[in-house]
Structures are given as structure tokens and as C-alpha cells.
Image: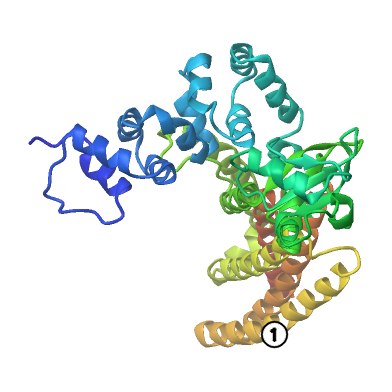
């Protein structure tokens, strides 16, 4: 049996326990493997393959689970796989998904293709989809699902239980039903566990919990995740500006938000937004902007050094020592920046405690500055046998570590106030600040020494 091209990488991606590497697989055997595993595992395999092997694996996915696989994929790969799919075929592919999962995919489509898709579906489906599409994808409205069970407060528990049994199957992650008024305004919620142990002749009004607040549709997804984490929620109601019940958000939607935000923040620290196996041209394009920005900041640092060229010519070993000061400042700034970005993401930092945290970071920088400057000063003296240069690098180290704290605190704060993501832009800015301050402090002090 002749192995097909890409067999090894495809089988490795599909199977956790990779079989004998000398074993060959036919396409029919590979198709059988694909049919036996779940959508999430297939999606992971697709994301783990180069483009050619990816196309082959996608062609082997059964049509009945193509929609589920698409939903599990990252946004860039979704766009790549559905760009040539006809709107009618796309609806057949994703039509059985839950509404929020379907909308997640549709939000990646260009406007014209989205309109073509909506023109192919029934009016009822179009109304449901457009209702969710009204809200940005990073809000509660963009996350909600309309598969919600609601009852009126006058109904008895017996009537509600009969209603639930008549439905045969409850929506996924249904831990509660929502109570609404005659005009669908949210009033409260009724946990199913509480309903099951209560007397059947009691009314919903007597058992409902009115202290559970619904989530506004325009609430950002990060805040939704915080609410779920803080209140240990499995599901929550979503309401519009008139407090009318729109739908619900479930914990699996929130988990997707948390994973996606963590992934974006991780890649954003390096200025990268791309699929792992994106083609070279696309990967180069996505990285070019941040490389260009970094080039500009590097030129700024070089221009700072050029100001002190005469001093470097006189004291050549300054060129050997100055990267140490800049590098230490950059690492210290990144540490402070990471602490602040994490605190902002968890909403732990506010106007009342930011000054305490800033003072704490200053104290940490002074302690580390004194310890590290003593260390580098001793090494410099033993290396060059020059007490003055050793003293200069000690002073410059302390100055730059303090500057690192200032940059690490104020850069993300300012970027946040300008509605910019500090996780993406913060690292470039703080590194530039510490490079420039490090060079100016060390070379500037050396210049004063040389002139004297």
C-alpha cells in the first residue's frame, strides 16, 4: 500500500497515540479514523496542519459534522475554509448549530456574502440571526442564544413541569428558567433544582429569585466572563435597553471568550495575529506592521546613542556596558506591565488602589535596583578596574529600573483610556522608554564624567 502525501503529519495530528510510523494508510482508512473522532479533535488536527494536508483532511470530514468542526476552528481558518462555499451549502452545513454558534461563523463573512446567506434562509431564521447580529460580537448580545425557556409568574410549578416534559428535550446547559412579564420583561429566574423539590401547587411568583440580575446586551464579553466567574453561573439572562428578555448566555460560551482573549493577549504581546500554519505571504503581512513600529523605536534608541558618540569614542567600554542597563530596564518594565495588564483584565485595578500598587512597584524597583546595581558595579570594577565607571552604571541601573516602573504603570493606563489594547501596544512602548532612559542615564552620566 503506497502512503499518500502528508500521511504522517495528518495521522499524527488526528491521533494522540500515534501508531507504528512504518504503517501505511489508505485514504479510506484515514476517512474511517476521521469518522470515529469528534468535531473538536478534527478541528485541532486541522489547526495543526500545513495548508495542503489541511485541505485533504477537510475533504474527508463528514458533511453532518462540518458545521460543528467549523465552529471549533479559529476565525482565520474558518474564513479560509468557507470562502468558496455557496451560501445555500453553507446554511446546510451550519443550520443545525445553536444560534450563537452559527452567528459566530457568520460574523466572519464579508458583508456581501452575509447578505447572500441571509437571502437563502427562511424569514424566521433570518429574523433570529439578525436579532443577534445587531450586537457586536464582543458583547453579551453577540454571545446570546435565543433557545431560552421563559414562564409567567402566575403559573404553578405543576403547569411548568408539564410544559417542560412536553418539550421532550431541554436546551443545552439549562439549569434555570426565566420569569417574564406579559410583555416579556425580565422579572427573575427559577432554578430547576429548586422547582423539582417544591410543592407542585406553589406558583412561580412564590419561588422565583428576583435578586439575580440579568446582563445587558451591550455588556462587553470580558465583563460577562467576570460575572460568570464571580457568581459561579452556568447560564444568565440577557436583556435589551427596555429590560426585555432577548436570550441567554451559557458557560460554554464564556469559556470560549476566556480562551480566545487569553490567546489574543498572548499573541498580541508579540504583535502577532495569525494562524500557526498560515501561508508565508499572509504571515509576513500580519507581522509587518509591528516589525515596522519596532524598527522605528530601534531607530529612536540608536539616535539617542548617537548623541553621545564622542563620549563612546573616548570611553570605548561604554559600548560594552550600555546594553546591560537598557536590557535590565526592559525586563523590569515588562514585569510591571504584565502585572498591570493582568490586574486590568481581572478588573482588580481601579482609581482607589492604583496609587498603592504604583508605590509598591517603586519600592520593589528600589530594592532590586540597589541589589542589582551593587552586583553589576562590582563586576564592572573587577572587569575594567575603574571605580567611576562602576559607580556610573550603578546609578544608571537604579534610574532605569525606576523609569521601568513608571512606564509599566502609566503606559497601559494611558492606552486603556484611549481605548487601545495595552497587551498589544504596551510592550513596544515600555521597551522603547526603558531603552532611551537607560542610554541617556548611563551615557549622559559618562559624558559628564568625561568632560570633568
Q: Residue furthest left?
A: 1
Nearer to us in this view, 265 or 67: 67
For label 1, the residue is 370
Nearer to us in this view, 189 or 56: 189
* Position of residue 279 in the picture relative to residue 344 (left or right): left
Nearer to us in this view, 173 or 85: 173
Q: Position of residue 447 (x, y in %)?
A: 70, 68
Please say if 191 is above or below 287. Answer: below
Residue at 61% in and 15% down: 121
Residue 182: image quadrant is: top right
Please say if 266 is above or below 383. Answer: above
Nearer to us in this view, 362 or 59: 59
* Position of residue 372 in the picture relative to residue 223 (left or right): left
Residue at 58% in and 52% down: 259
* Position of residue 189 in the picture relative to residue 259 (left or right): right
Residue at 61% in and 67% down: 331
Q: Position of residue 345 (x, y in %)?
A: 72, 58
Q: Residue furthest front?
A: 201
Give the mark count. 1
- Is the residue marked by circle 1 packed among few (<14), some (14-19), or many (20+) residues within 10 Å? some
Task: Describe the colour scheme in one phrase.
Answer: rainbow
From where the camera sits, is residue 31 visible?
Answer: yes
Q: Position of residue 104 (x, y in %)?
A: 61, 34
Q: Position of residue 432 (x, y in %)?
A: 67, 55
From where the camera sits, is residue 385 visible?
Answer: no
* Viewport quadrant of the N terminus: top left
* Viewport quadrant of the C terminus: bottom right
**SS label for mark 1:** helix
Please say if 220 is above or below 280. Answer: below
Residue 229: image quadrant is: bottom right
Amino acid at each position: 500500500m503506497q502512503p499518500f502525501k502528508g500521511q504522517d503529519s495528518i495521522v499524527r495530528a488526528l491521533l494522540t497515540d500515534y501508531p507504528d510510523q512504518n504503517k501505511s494508510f489508505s485514504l479510506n482508512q484515514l476517512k474511517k479514523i476521521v469518522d470515529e473522532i469528534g468535531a473538536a479533535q478534527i478541528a485541532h488536527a486541522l489547526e495543526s496542519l500545513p495548508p495542503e494536508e489541511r485541505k485533504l483532511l477537510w475533504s474527508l470530514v463528514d458533511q453532518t459534522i462540518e458545521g460543528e468542526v467549523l465552529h471549533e476552528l479559529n476565525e482565520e481558518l474558518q474564513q479560509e475554509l468557507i470562502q468558496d462555499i455557496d451560501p445555500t451549502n453553507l446554511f446546510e452545513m451550519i443550520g443545525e448549530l445553536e444560534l450563537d454558534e452559527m452567528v459566530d461563523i457568520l460574523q466572519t463573512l464579508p458583508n456581501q456574502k452575509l447578505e447572500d446567506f441571509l437571502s437563502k434562509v427562511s424569514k424566521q431564521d433570518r429574523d433570529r440571526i439578525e436579532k443577534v447580529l445587531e450586537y457586536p460580537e464582543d458583547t453579551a448580545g453577540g454571545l446570546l442564544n435565543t433557545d431560552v425557556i421563559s414562564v409567567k409568574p402566575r403559573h404553578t410549578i405543576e403547569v411548568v413541569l408539564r410544559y417542560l416534559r412536553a418539550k421532550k428535550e431541554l436546551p443545552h446547559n439549562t439549569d434555570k428558567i426565566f420569569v417574564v412579564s406579559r410583555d416579556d420583561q425580565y422579572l427573575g429566574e427559577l432554578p430547576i433544582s429548586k422547582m423539582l423539590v417544591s410543592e407542585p401547587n406553589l406558583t412561580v411568583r412564590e419561588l422565583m429569585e428576583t435578586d439575580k440580575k440579568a446582563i445587558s446586551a451591550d455588556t462587553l464579553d470580558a465583563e460577562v466572563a467576570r460575572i460568570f466567574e464571580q457568581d459561579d453561573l452556568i447560564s444568565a439572562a440577557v436583556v435589551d435597553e427596555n429590560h426585555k428578555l432577548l436570550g441567554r448566555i451559557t458557560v460554554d460560551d464564556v469559556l470560549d471568550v476566556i480562551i480566545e482573549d487569553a490567546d489574543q493577549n498572548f499573541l498580541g504581546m508579540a504583535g502577532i495575529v495569525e494562524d500557526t500554519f498560515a501561508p508565508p505571504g499572509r504571515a509576513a503581512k500580519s507581522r509587518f506592521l509591528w516589525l515596522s513600529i519596532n524598527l522605528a523605536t530601534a531607530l529612536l534608541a540608536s539616535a539617542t546613542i548617537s548623541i553621545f558618540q564622542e563620549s563612546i569614542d573616548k570611553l570605548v567600554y561604554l559600548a560594552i556596558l550600555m546594553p546591560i542597563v537598557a536590557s535590565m530596564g526592559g525586563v523590569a518594565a515588562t514585569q510591571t506591565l504584565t502585572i498591570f495588564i493582568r490586574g486590568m483584565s481581572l478588573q482588580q485595578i481601579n482609581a482607589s488602589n492604583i496609587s498603592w500598587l504604583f508605590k509598591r512597584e517603586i519600592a520593589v524597583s528600589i530594592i532590586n535596583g540597589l541589589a542589582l546595581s551593587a552586583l553589576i558595579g562590582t563586576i564592572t570594577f573587577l572587569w575594567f578596574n575603574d571605580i567611576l565607571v562602576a559607580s556610573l552604571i550603578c546609578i544608571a541601573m537604579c534610574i532605569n529600573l525606576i523609569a521601568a516602573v513608571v512606564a509599566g504603570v502609566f503606559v497601559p493606563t494611558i492606552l486603556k483610556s484611549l481605548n487601545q489594547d495595552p497587551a498589544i501596544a504596551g510592550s513596544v512602548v515600555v521597551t522603547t522608554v526603558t531603552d532611551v532612559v537607560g542610554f541617556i542615564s548611563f551615557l549622559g552620566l559618562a559624558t559628564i564624567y568625561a568632560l570633568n
